[in-house]
Structure formats: C-alpha cells, structure tokens
Amino acid sequence: MTNTSSDLLEFDALLRVVGRYVGSPMGQEELRNTAPITDRGRIESLHAYNAEAISYLKSATKTQASGRSGQVARINFNDMPDSRPAAARLRIEGAMLDGKEIFDLLGLLERASEIRAGLQGFGDVFPLLTKLSARIADLRPLLHDLSNKLLPDGSLADHASVALQKIRRGIERQKRLIEESLERFLRAHRQDGVLQEDFITIRNDRFVVPIVTGQQGRINGVIHGASSSGQTLFVEPFDTIELNNDLVRLTEEELREVHRILREMSDRLRREAPSITASLDVLGELDFLFAKANFAIEFDCVVPRFSSEEQPSLHLDGARHPLLQDVLRRQRKPIIPISFTLDSQRRILLLSGPNTGGKTVTLKTAGLLSLMAQAGIPVPARDAEFPVFDQVLADVGDNQSIAESLSSFSSHIKRVREILTLVTPESLVLLDELGRATDPEEGGALGVAIIDGLRGWRAFTLASTHLLALKVYGARSNGVMNGSMGFDRDTLEPTYHLRTGAPGDSAGLAIASRLGMPPDIIEKARANMTTRERDLSDFLNELQAQVTALSAERQAMEQQRQQLEAREKSLAAEWERKETAKLKELEKRTEELMRQFEENSRQTIESIAQNMEQRKATEHAQRRVAKAVREFRTEVQEAIRPVTQNPVVKAPLVIEEGTRVRLKSMRQPARVKRKLSGDRLEVEAGFMKLQISIDDIEEVLPETGGDTARLPSNVTFQSSGPRWDVSYRELNLIGKRAEEAIDELDRFLDQAVLASVNRLRIVHGHGMGVLKKAVAEVLAKHPHVAKFYPGTPAEGGTGATVVELKDM
C-alpha cells in the first residue's frame, strides 16, 4: 500500500502491542516486515490462517481447562535462540560452526520438529496450520545422531567419538600423574621453607607450585611467572616437565579431534541448509501467526471481511481503537465502541459534536483498523467489513512547524492539497477538523468545496468539523451522511457514543464550563451569541435528543423482535414435539390392534382347519385375512403420513384375456384366463386358479417373452421336473427313505412358497421316527418356515406335522 499515513494513525505503535505476544527472534523479524498490502488474495489468505490460529488457541484453552491429555495443546515460542546467522553461514562452503552455535541450532530444530508433530495430528480440523507446519523439515534422524554429542555450553561430550573419549581418558590419567608428582615434591619441601603455599596451581597451561622468591636456587625447575606482589614464584619442577609436555600433547590432540568433529557436524548440517532455513522461516511465520491470534483473543478481535469491488462497503460494528483500549484496560476503565456503515451509495461521513468527544479517535479508529485489516491483523470489533483500499490518506492533528514557517492553517491546507493530488476512488481519506484555524465562514466554504471534490472522486471519506456550512452540506447532499458524538447536557460531559443521521452541537461553552472557565466569562459568551446562533444550537440539541430517543426505540423494537422470533421458534418446536408424540402413540396403538387382529384370525383359521372337509374355507379365510391386514396397514399409513404432494391419479387398467397382472394379495404374477360376468376374472397364479374382482389387481405387467426372458445371456434355466400339485397342501412321505423324503420335502416347500400357500401338512407316519426326525430337521432350517407342530387328532396326530409358512 502506497502513501499511507501509518505514522499519523500509529500503526507502528500497534505493532509494538502485537509484538508483546511474539516469542522468538524469527517472529520478531516477521513482525518488523508486516505492512498493509493491496493484494486481495494474499490478504484473505492471511486472515484465513488467523481464523484457524484463533480457533486452535481457543481449543487449547478448553483442553487445558478440562485437564485432558492428547488434545490440542498450546505452542510455546518463548526463549528460542536466534540461529539465523548460523544457518546463513552454513550456506558458505567450508564454514564451520562452533559448539554453542550447533547446540542452539539443534535445540531450535528439535522444537520445530515437536511443533510440526503437534500440528500434523489435526489436519481435518486445522488444514491450513497443518499445511504450513508441513514445510518444517523432518530432520529427526539428523537430530538423533547429533543432539547427544553436545553439552549445553557447546562443549563436546566424551562419547562424541571413540578417539575423543580415548584422548580425554589419557588427559585425566596424565593429570593424575602430574598431581602425584607434584604432591611428592610438596611433601619433600614442606619443612625446608621453600614453599610459599602448600597447593598446586596452573600457569601457562602447565601445573606448577608456588615457592618463596629467592629460594628458586634450592630446587631444580622452570619458573613460569611471579605473583603481582613479587613474593611468590611459580615453578615447574624438572620431574614434571615431561609429564606436562605429554599433557600439552594430549590437549592439542583433543583440540584437533574437537575441531574435526565440529567440522563434520557442520558439514552434515550444511547438507540440510535449505531445509533448515525453510524450517526457521516457518517457525517465524507460526510464531507471528499465533501472536496475532493471542492479540485477537486478548483484545476481543474479529477476522474482517472484504467487500467486492462492485459493492464496496466500510462497515464497523462495535469497533475499538486498540491503543486506547490497551491504556483504558490498564486503568480498569471501559472503552466505548463505535459503529457506522458506509457503502457505494453513501461514502462520506461528516462527524460533529463536542470537543474532547471522540471525533478524532473515531477517525483514527477507522484508519488504523483499515491498515490492520490489510496487514493481515485481526481488528478489535464485533463485526468488520472493508474495501481493499489502495491508500489511506490522513490529515489528523496539528502539523504546525516553526522551522518550516508553517502555521496551523497553512500546514493543514498543504496536507489537504497533497491528499487531493493523490486520492483515487479506492482511497480512504481522513480529515480532522476540516476548515480549521481560519475564519469560520471561509473555512466552512473551503471545507464544503473539499468534501464535494472528494465526493466526485467517490473516495470513502471521514471528516470531523465544527462548521455549520459542512453540517448543512451533509444534510442536503446525496452520498454524504452526518454523524455526531454524544453529549450529556446534565453532566456536561461527552458520552463518546457515535450516532449517525444527524449533526451534533459543538457544546463549546458547556465544555469550557466543565473545564473550569469562570462562570462570568461563560455568561458573557452566551450573551454575545446571536439569536440565530442560539436557535441553531437549541435546534441541534433537540435534534440530537430526538436521534437518541429514536435510537433507543429502535433498539427496544429490535429486542422485542428477537424475543418474538425466539417465542415463535419455541412454540413451533413444542407443537412439533406434541404432534410427533401423537403419531408415535397412534402407530403404537395401530400395531397393537393389528397384532390382536392377526392373533384372533390365526386362532379362527386353526379352528376351521381342524376339519379336513373345510380346507377350501380355510384358504379363502386366509386370503381374506391377508388382504384385510394389508388394506388396514395401508389405510393407517396414509392416515398418519403428512400430505407433501398432489395425489397421483392412476390410469384405468386395460385387461384382456392372457394379460399378465400382479395381484394385491400375492407376490407371484398371474395371468388372466378368461373374463367372467361383471368385474369378475379367472386368473392362474402358479398352480392355482382363482376367481377375483378386477379391484384385486395391483397393476398390469408387461409381457416378458417367457419365464426365462429376464435371465442374463450367460444364464440358462432348466425345469426341475414335473410340477407338484400343492392344491391339497399335503405331502405324504410314508414308505420313502429319508434322503428321498428330504428332497421331495424341499421341492414341496419351494412350490408352496411360489403358490403363496400359508399352511401345509406333512404325513410321515410313526414307524421308528426316522422320517419324523428328518422332516423336523429340514423344517427347522428352512428360511420360509415360520413354525411347525404335530397335527391335531383329526390331522393324524404325531404321525403328521403341520407347517406354517412366513407371510411373503
């Protein structure tokens, strides 16, 4: 974004507030690089990430409050070292990092790996965070190999290599030998007055003993220095020189091995330099992203929307200036939010009202929140929508400059002139106290001309003023809206509430009185006001009171509307619940009646079936019962089913002899054999011939070209043999072997099912009970058998089994 007035709108101060939540140097770098942009796609992408980060932190807070583990956890970016210089040096071939740099870099990569693992587990809930964290390189094998070789101070652990461990053991052994040699020296000279102190020390990386100055001639050794007082000489006895030489040699070997290991570790890290740099960049992005999310939660912010270019809209609901909110929160004082809407039809808001009433804060709030939104930072408001501005142009505050010989008016006009040369239809313009610091009449005329010019540019504009000419212009001009900051006449204090639709009174005398101006001065000022000015002030006060009353009434009506909507929804839900309960009760009672009806029917049919001569009556009764049950069920379902569509009128059935039909009472298709008198027909269904009414026909079926016409081309059908006549519903198996009887029984049951027969009798006799047992085993496993039991004495007693088939 070019030509922004971010310094006037305190954008840098806002970034410092957000920076409180940044934990790492990489995040601070991201913060320093943050600025408003005009790329709509990039802006919306930034806020999509913001929304996920805010949701993540809220989920983490709930998890922490519940004490559950394995859920979303907060990510800590604090106390991360700045390893970017070390990572940059890795890109230089041959460059070597020291132990501390490698230790810090490995620790940082370890934390990056933990963050990556933590976010990768929630891809379905936080896809953008998961995608961003996936850019952190998986360097766990490298970290596993290198991390345990370094100590926190950057020194190498003994086990960093076999050679280093061997050398350090040799050093320790050599130091013991030197100490033992010097201990012998001290014991030998402890009583002869040569020793200054009875201890061993180090000078120039060699072990020495302190002796009295002047006594060096009494011992054989090399002097390595003297104390600051000159009273002590530090001597290395000849007996330990060779031992010290061996120690120096081992120490040099240790340094060479350490250098080799650090170079080797640096080379391994260098091979991953691009991945390491990318991982540190992602850490910075994540740190800054979660800093913005923490800021949003602390300041009760929302993720803003952006209006289309065709229908631009600047909408703020409950907006707050974040810097003022920060100050008032520390003072434990509330902040008064502002709300207004400008759109393509009305792009200019003229603010008037009392001094110290919040006009300038309103301008700064609109400007700063616009910059925040286009910088990808959530804004403190209940709801917010912005156009994508190409620039924010502001003249806020007094730019008087003695050095440049600029008065308040001239500096104001100079800045406004610059704005008029830069403004475009996509600009946001903020003008504080337009037409100030000059004659009110001329200032008003100039202000009207400036606002009218901005209206011609169709730029979104907020301007504050005390000038009557501008207030009148706002009331009479299309595309311009007046707004006023509230003022309490009883307390003589501003309320800081923004109300749109009418201008406000400046209340200069009231404010002066509240600020301690002597009463006699105030009374003289009132007397000096013209009648026109007093009438205008009274009119504005009355208008402001009416606007306040209308606003309160509108709010009350809105609350009442919401209450009515809630009551309507509650009544609808209660009605639906009661109707559902009624339908369930009706269905329950219907099912119970049907069950009782079927049970009574079955008992009646069984009593009829006991007489073998009344089988035909039994069949007829069964068909009538089945038909009655189906009709009853259909009627009940129709009664309780809500009417959702127009009834479908079926075409009349065209039935001729030979027509294939489906009966309401049978699953198997039937064919019309001949027409009888009236609406009676004779049909054949399987092995049965029936006389039915035309009303018993469900539908006319198309001709299939034979029983096998619907089979696939690679499937053939072969009849199993002569059809069994089940018209008598009885199978006699007496005298047959068990295997033969089982086959015949299977075929008999299948044909009975096809013929829609419900009750059968199997005659197997008494004998040895083999046939009876075989029949019972078949019936127990057959899928179409509902139940079976011994016949009545009239049906053959235990020599016969009665079978009831399932209703198909």
Image: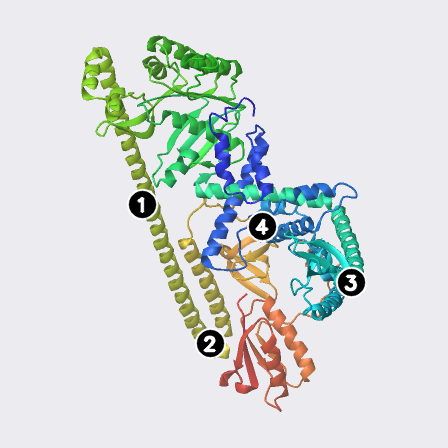
Which badge, 3 or 1, is on the more N-terminal residue? Answer: 3
Could you classify mark 1 by the number of other residues whose Cα lies within 10 Å: few (under 14), some (14-19), or many (20 or more)? Answer: few
The residue to which callout 3 is attached is: 220
Examine the image and state in which quarter residue 321 appears: top left
Please give the label number shown on residue 124: 4
- Residue 716 visible in the snapshot: no
Question: Up-down: is 147 above or below 379?
Answer: below
Is 319 placed left or right of 554 in the picture?
Answer: right
Amino acid type at circle 4 is: Asp
> Residue 469, image x and y in percent?
34, 12
**Labelled pair 3, 1 in contact (Cβ < 8 Å):** no
Mark 2 to mark 4: distance in Å? 63 Å
Of tags 2 and 4, the one toward the viewer is 4
Amino acid type at circle 1 is: Arg
The residue to which callout 1 is attached is: 567
Please give the label number shown on residue 606: 2
**Labelled pair 3, 4 in contact (Cβ < 8 Å):** no
Mark 1 to mark 4: distance in Å? 37 Å
Which badge, 1 or 4, is on the more N-terminal residue? Answer: 4
**Labelled pair 2, 1 in contact (Cβ < 8 Å):** no
Mark 2 to mark 1: distance in Å? 58 Å
Could you classify mark 2 by the number of other residues whose Cα lies within 10 Å: few (under 14), some (14-19), or many (20 or more)? Answer: few
Of tags 2 and 3, the one toward the viewer is 3
